[in-house]
Amino acid sequence: MNAQQYIELEDQHGANIYNPLDVVISHGEGVWVYDIQGNRFLDCLSAYSALNQGHVHPQILDAMCNQASKLTLTSRAFRNDQLPLLYKELSELTGYEMSLPMNSGAEAVETAIKLARKWAYQVKGVPRYQAEIITCQNNFHGRTLSVISFSTEKLYKEDFGPFTPGFVEVPFGDAQVLENAITQNTAAILVEPIQGEAGVIVPPNGYLQRLREISDENNILLIADEIQTGLGRTGKMFACDHENIRPDVLIIGKAFSGGFYPISAVLADRNLLGLFNPGEHGSTFGGNPLGAAIARAALRVIQDENLVQNAAGMGEYFNEQLAEIPSRHVKEVRGKGLLIGVELKTKAGGARRFCEELQAKFILAKETHENVIRFAPPLIIDRETIDWALLRIREVLTME
Ligand SMILES: *Cc1c(COP(=O)(O)O)cnc(C)c1O
């Protein structure tokens, strides 16, 4: 079959919930992917940062194949010999005493919300079913119904109500307004340290520290959604590390499996995760031995290959070089580490046409909202490859 036939087949039988670039990829290796004609492209999206370790990382592949040949699923009705090791390694890596594994990122966010509500009723003493969670405008935390209930993006929620109550929205980046929104019933603040899907929005310096203080002063939980920013992406293991703060609840997903498998987790200390009792939450596949073995290998790769340091160094270089491109279309280059957004002026005619031009030059990047091109290659990228990309990006950003 040729590319056009694949595309037609997909459009005919698949619900049209994405607007993909028309490139039909059949294999990947490291930072590169190959289409069915054998053309090689640089992946500058990394599956929304799920591929921090690069495509088909050999060590993760080994771990996956090895575990798949032994044991894949027990359900949590029985124990297995992988999950305890993942718990231990996650604790050593993050300093949190406990974790709760789920599958998708959105499920982990839902889990964190349930946890915050339970804590509010059982520990804080909020009257039952009155708990409020403060969320930020332009957030992205996933696509399930409760999660879109606190989305502020019309496209994500229109026609999908009725919505789950109990959420209060405030502007992102303004700690004062957030503080004013706190009531006796506030259970938690849920925040992305950098808003990825909103277009790589970096809050002012000190914002996260201020949220930490506000949470402590008001006896509320600080929940950081690091599904996209975590595990090295921004040049620190977690984006919260840039401000040396420790959220009460940390949510991870995406690169947690290096792109091999959906696995996510909610991390917290025993005083919180210990609130869950048998039967109160669960997932058939959550914490299965295949996923656990994959996640263990994926975490090891991040550490063994110093991907956090590489993201910091390469990110700084990429960011600086992008900012120096003399383009009349660019409004701002921003980001941290290898999570970079290039915002175009509105009169540039939208980011999509630039992404299509980049594709023609063998770079895959995706527009984020109307006017932002996100550059988020795998964290294994080297300077030579960035230079290769910059040559092409420069041509595209300086076109008419
Ligand atoms: C991708 C993402 C999610 C949702 O993860 P899924 O695995 O797609 O459900 C949640 N929060 C953030 C910040 C994300 O980037």
Image (cartoon, helix red, strand yellow):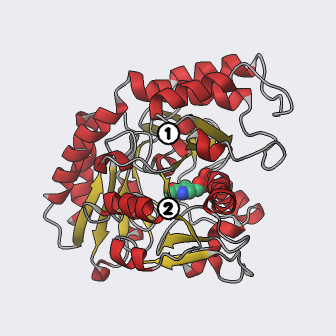
Residue linked to disc 2: 219
Between disc 1 and disc 2, the foreground one is: 2
* Quadrant containing the C terminus in the rendered view: bottom left
x, y (%) of residue 367?
43, 65
Position of 38 with respect to 210 (left or right) is: right
Which label's residue is closer to the chain start, 1 or 2?
A: 1
Label 1 and label 2: CA atoms lie apart by 51 Å
Q: Secondary structure at mark 2?
A: loop
- The answer to whether residue 156 of the structure is visible from this angle is no
Above or below: residue 46 compared with residue 208: above
Quadrant assignment for ligand 1: bottom right
Q: Secondary structure at mark 1?
A: strand
Q: Nearer the viewer, residue 206 or 65?
A: 206
Q: Nearer the viewer, residue 296 or 273?
A: 273
Above or below: residue 45 compared with residue 174: above
x, y (%) of residue 103?
68, 45
Q: Nearer the viewer, residue 134 or 260?
A: 134
x, y (%) of residue 14?
74, 61
Q: Are marks 1 and 2 in contact (CB under 8 Å)?
A: no
Q: Quadrant of residue 168?
A: bottom right
The kind of residue on which mark 1 rests is Tyr
Above or below: residue 364 compared with residue 88: below
Using the image, tell me which numbered label, if any, was put on residue 26. Answer: none
Residue linked to disc 1: 34
